[in-house]
Amino acid sequence: MLGSLLTALTAAVERSQAAGRTTSERLRQLETEQLTLHVLAATVVFLIVLPVLIAALVSTKRAGIVTSIADLAPGGHALSNYRRALIGLEFWRYMLNSFVMSIAVVVGKLIVSLLAALVIVYYRFPYKNAVFLFILFTLLLPVPVRFVPLYRLTTELGMGNTFFAITVPYLASATTVFILRQHFLSIPASLVETAKVDGVGPLRFLWSVLVPMSRAVLVGVSVIMFVYTWNQYLWPLVIINAESLQVAQVGLSLLRGQASTGEVAWSMVMTGSILTLLPPLALLVLFRRQLLETFTIQQK
Amino acid sequence: MTDLTLQGVRKEFDGVVAVKNIDLHIPDGAFVTVVGPSGCGKSTTLRLIAGLEQATDGMIQMGTQDVTGVEPKDRDVAMVFQNYALYPHMTARRNITFGMKAAGDFSDEEIERQVAEAAAVLDIDDLLDRKPGELSGGERQRVALGRALVRDPEVFLMDEPLSNLDAKLRIKMRAELAKLHSEFGTTTIYVTHDQTEALTLGDRVVVMNDGRIQQVDSPQRLYDFPKTRFVAEFIGDPAMNMLPVDIARNGTDYEAVGPTFRITLPEGDGLEAAAGGQAILGIRPESLSVADSADRSSFTAEVTVTEPLGDSLLLECRTGDQEFKLHAEPRTAVKPGDQVALTVDAERLHLFDSQTGNAIYHAAAAQSLEETDTVDSTI
């Protein structure tokens, strides 16, 4: 639905751009069209954000059971709820774990993907395209499909229930390699050829030329990778037993379990949800420009 | 500085042969231009010399060293690209020093001194702290040249370095390149598709077509004594006119006989063998002129198009079913549809084999084809 709306939006914008050249009638038509578009877009955004808004409201209440519209009025327990979740129920620990895991994965992924993309774009070796296709094929096997062998491998390597178990399996990323490859391909080949003739080594070229020339894309993919890692739930749930090592997404369900009366403490869960939402949200807001740039590259 | 030898060099890309068996010797300190149409293999040849491509077959020698399988960085060459290949995020100074620093053969003071020298020669002192985005095309190309200069390489390789510049700047930079070469004397190989650049810059010009070297010669000899029909038509603008003729013997003279003309050919090598057969007569547009009155040596043609160029009047003419161009005196009073009498400069005629396209005769009697051959093999 969102896709078709987007298509309609761009088509309308193009039409209005093409039409809006001369007469005032066309200008009026354009205004109406744009108004309709904005209303449409606002409605869609509202629908998407609605659950988050409700979660934010519930996180300010004591009980957090919503049965009528009146229950949606903000409550007065915001501060105590957030304090209880973060400190009382030690949610900060899960968030810290998630944060460390995400940073480690982002850095590791960047290094691995940069090197892979460098080799794929700038080096000649037999069956290069086949190798790249093989990397892309791994996209067909998402992490959950690999759980059983991955679990055996991780535990047999003695990494079960450790920090490595929730970072190392994420380090190779076909998506990142693909995005970086596309970006590197847009950099003129003569740059690397100059470097080769001048005796600039591949790693120096990567560090001094490719990385500075790819800054926006690197920030973009880093945000994507961070959010992706931050949102990991199933694998940490499977491989991590120690609560002290657990990540925020799994920690959310632990918040629910803290309800002593047997009832689900929805306000606590929503408080945790909003807390979990904040870091990715902050990143998206901060780096929206670089993200957009990254997505345009992907479309090339 | 060093000399460079290519022996039987061949390059295939996935079954497509880009360069077919090239033999070429480039003497120490020469400025050699390589010219040819797109896809003739000239850039590939340059990249083979740079080491950016590996030859499928053959040997490349620099001085006495066989460099065929040697990495680009160990060949001591510097390359200048058509798109300048400057790193956009680095200042001009950093662009120039980046390669030097990577090579690690230079001390900081040396780098400083080299950059200052190159900047002075290229007149880019004031631009060193700007990034490529803040420079014009000509300035960027100067920085790219500076980057090549400071490396003080054995051989300069230039791949159409002036193609992205506008016409005026190109002529200016052309003169500067020639000056730079006379100053530094570094062996230079310069690839271009522009025959004017090739002729004006090169001590020696290599004409390539279809992956093969057609001719290697000095610019004037290339123009005066093209070895093949391809070279004759490629060098010179407008191209040499090519008219199919019969070669007939008339007493002691030989004549080129077309449907509407008979042109007496001055005595020279190759005529005897060609007599009685067919050939292609090559006449440059400036070797034809409009005669005041028709006489025995002239023939008539109909003017189809007139193009006043200012310093001359370019006429397109037709005689029988053959079309050709000629440079007439400016302000000649002719218009399309006129019949004009034409005479040829008998010293400037060429004959080419109609099948192979090889030159069989050049009227300019003083030099013979064999001489061209010896020059070819020694360069």
Image (spheres, grey):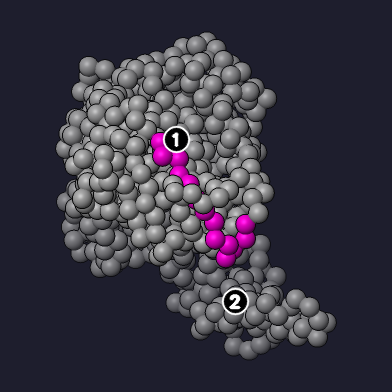
The location of residue B176, given as percent across then percent down, is: 56, 26
Which residue range is magenta in the image?
A: B334-347
Name the amino acid type tagged 2: Thr
User: Is B187 drawn above or below residue B22 in the view shown?
Assistant: above
Inspect the magenta stretch and tell me whether residue B275 lies in it. Answer: no
Mark 1 to mark 2: distance in Å? 50 Å
Question: Label 2 neighbourhood size at 10 Å, few (<14), some (14-19), many (20+)?
Answer: few
Residue A68's mark?
none
Residue placed farthest to the bottom in the image? Answer: A68
Q: In this rendering, is residue A29 above or below A138? A: below
Residue under the point 59% across and 80% down: A11
Specify the label residue A10 is tagged with: 2
Q: Nearer the viewer, residue B379 or A110?
A: B379
Q: Does the magenta stretch include residue B344?
A: yes
Q: Where is residue B231 in the image (x, y as percent from the top left)?
A: 35, 42
- Determine which residue is flagged by label 1: B198
Dot 1 and dot 2 within a common chain: no
Q: Which x, y percent locates residue B357?
A: 27, 48
- Secondary structure state at the residue bearing disc 1: helix
Type of residue at label 1? Answer: Ala
Chain that bears disc 2: A
> In the picture shown, does residue A240 fall above or below A37?
above
Residue at (55, 70) in percent of width and height: A270
